[in-house]
Image (cartoon, helix red, strand yellow):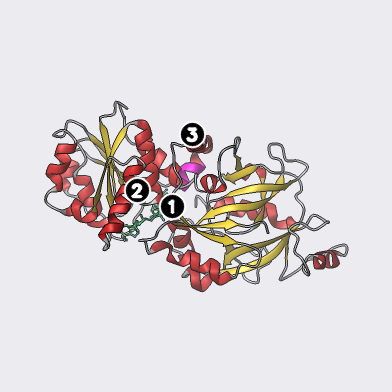
Amino acid sequence: MASSLPLQASFRTSLPTIISRSRPVCRFGQRQRLAKFAVGSRRTISSYGYTQAKALVYSKYGEPQDVLSLHGHSISPATGSSVVLRMLVAPINPADVNQIQGVYPAKPEMTIALGTSEPSAVAGNEGVAEVVSTGSGVKNLQRGDWVIMKSTGMGTWRTHMAVDESQLIKIDNKDGLTPLQVGTVSVNPCTAYRMLLDYAKWGFRGDEWFIQNGANSGVGRAAIQLGREWGLKSINVIRGRENKEEEQKLRQSLLDIGATKVITEEELLGREIKDQIKEWTKGGREQIRVGLNCVGGKNATALAKFLSPGGTMVTYGAMSKQPIALPASLLIFKDITFNGFWVSKWSDQHPDLKKQTVDDVLRLTREGKFKDIPVQECRWGWKTEVDTLKSAVQGTLGGFRPGKGVFVFEET
Ligand SMILES: NC(=O)c1ccc[n+]([C@@H]2O[C@H](COP(=O)([O-])OP(=O)(O)OC[C@H]3O[C@@H](n4cnc5c(N)ncnc54)[C@H](OP(=O)(O)O)[C@@H]3O)[C@@H](O)[C@H]2O)c1
């Protein structure tokens, strides 16, 4: 599995450095030292260099509400090529929830490395962290640097972690960037970037289109902005809202970040859209080269029908949980190609390209050309209750949310 290996490696590296608070392993009087920061005012790092940490873990698959628990443990000072990190921001992506439910293809390895009573995995796949301390063999990182994870599956829903430097990507220039921007760059923007660039031969003349559903998703919003930057026009399909004022606001928010056209699912499936799209694309002379499918079902079938001959549909999500039915004519007469994209696999196969992609999105962000996604922050301090954290995760797949859930870690 693309993402189980990094997790395995991460735990292997961390193993000697982690001391569970529920099952303490004490050497040379460590019990007393650890007790020092267990009472009174809390300090992240004791005078002996131990870091107190909390992680959202699960030992069996199920609904986040039922299976997540908050596990406290201590991390010993970094040695060799390992570093100790403090998480700054970690988003709550749909795939994180699917992974906890056990329905995601990448399964995390469950281990007792953090001293949990049952073999467990730390949830979360994306985020940005600050380097707190480095082992003597660490070459490219220093205290205060910001890093993101090289692969998915490393378990980012935790206050701190110990990890080998080889598993991290350093943010070379964090000036002008916020933790939220860096902590959400590696999954959604990278997915949109690669799907748009790698599945068509664009002329970049300003007269080409892509069409996408799930346009209000993190990936969808990233695609709109990258498309605008590259001169690609876009037709963006959203789910309509019962409250039409809200729907209008949503349309406008996508137009504001560079969407050319925004339509609802209902409009996509309606009768008038065919003529409308013909008019927008100047009678079809402007080609719709790529379709990005986040949703599946009837919506995806309709989307595919609007692709120009020779176009490509890239499926990356299945939010409706419905399979895609494809009319044979699209394959026989229009020569439409159907592909899938998985950013976890792509990142593992192209680590250098991942860094370049991340750097380019961060450059655009710094220049004000790539705007933040709307978010619902869940602040995670030392005293935050597990129920608060779990409820931030639970609503993720429901949709109709004002923004993506993100954990924002306080100084703990
Ligand atoms: N293959 C990959 O490499 C890759 C990478 C990143 C993401 N993904 C996948 O892409 C999808 C979106 O991820 P994200 O992080 O961008 O999502 P997100 O920001 O959390 O947004 C989720 C989106 O899904 C829409 N949605 C939810 N249920 C739906 C339904 N039944 N029918 C239609 N739309 C529905 C929501 O629409 P509303 O705005 O109307 O609520 C919302 O726009 C997920 O399936 C995720 O797993 C795949």
Q: Image height check: is 376 above or below 194?
A: below
Q: Name the residue under label 2.
A: 253
Provide residue 27's location: percent of width, then percent of height.
84, 63
Q: Is residue 196 magenta?
A: no
Q: Which mark is residue 374?
A: 1
Q: In which quarter of the image is ligand 1?
A: bottom left
Provide residue 228's location: percent of width, then percent of height.
35, 35
Q: Is mark 2 on a helix, strand or loop?
A: helix
Left or right: where 376 falls relative to 20: left
Quadrant in the picture for the C terminus: bottom right
The residue positioned 28% from the left and 58% from the top of the image is 245
Q: Which mark is residue 367?
A: 3
Asked if the residues shown at circle 2 and circle 3 are in contact, with their CB atoms under 8 angstroms apart, the answer is no
Which residue appears farthest toward the front when viewing the image?
245
Question: What amino acid is labelled 2 in the image?
Answer: Ser
Query: Is the magenta region chiefly helix, strand or loop?
Result: helix
Which residue appears farthest toward the bottom when viewing the image?
66
Q: Does the magenta stretch include residue 345?
A: yes
Residues at marks 2 and 3, CA–CA distance in whole angstroms: 20 Å
The residue positioned 66% from the left and 52% from the top of the image is 86
Question: What amino acid is labelled 1 in the image?
Answer: Pro
